[in-house]
Image (tube, rainbow, N blue to C red):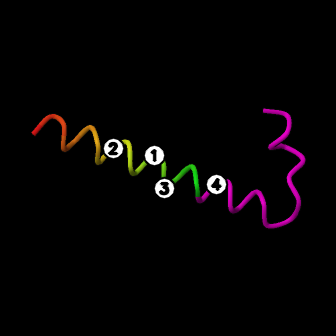
Amino acid sequence: MSCCNKAPKGGASLGLLLKLIAAIFVVLLIASYWQ
């Protein structure tokens, strides 16, 4: 992921936010699957 290392200002925080949302979505998906 060398392309993400040279992201413009504001792009890094946006990518981090998207990763956080994706992680929460996966956790909720797994939790709802096991119930």
Q: Earlier in the sequence, mark 4 or mark 1?
A: 4
Q: Amino acid at mark 2?
A: Val
Which stretch appears magenta? 1-17
Label 1 secondary element: helix
Q: Mark 3 to mark 4: distance in Å?
A: 9 Å
Q: Which mark is residue 27?
A: 2
Residue position marked by numbered label 3 in the rendering: 21
- Please give left or right for residue 21 compared with residue 25 in the image: right
Q: Residues within 10 Å of mark 4 (few under 14, many from 20)?
A: few
Q: Residues within 10 Å of mark 2 (few under 14, many from 20)?
A: few
- Please give left or right for residue 25 compared with residue 19 in the image: left
How many dots with numbers?
A: 4
- The x, y position of residue 10, in whole percent, is 79, 67
Residue drawn at point x = 29 percent, y = 43 percent: 29
Which quadrant holds the N terminus?
top right
Q: Mark 3 to mark 2: distance in Å?
A: 10 Å
Q: Mark 2 to mark 1: distance in Å?
A: 6 Å
Q: Residues within 10 Å of mark 3 (few under 14, many from 20)?
A: few
Q: Earlier in the sequence, mark 3 or mark 4?
A: 4
- Asked whether the beta carbons under mark 2 and mark 4 sit within 8 Å of each other, the answer is no
33 lies above or below 23: above
The prevailing secondary structure element of the residues shown in magenta is helix
- Asked whether the beta carbons under mark 2 and mark 1 sit within 8 Å of each other, the answer is yes
- Asked whether the beta carbons under mark 1 and mark 3 sit within 8 Å of each other, the answer is yes
Residue drawn at point x = 45 percent, y = 46 percent: 23
- Residue 20 magenta-highlighted: no
- Please give left or right for residue 28 compared with residue 23 in the image: left
In terms of depth relative to the viewer, which is nearer, 12 or 25?
25
Residue position marked by numbered label 1 in the rendering: 23
Which quadrant holds the C terminus?
top left
Q: Residue farthest to the bottom?
A: 10
Residue position marked by numbered label 4 in the rendering: 16
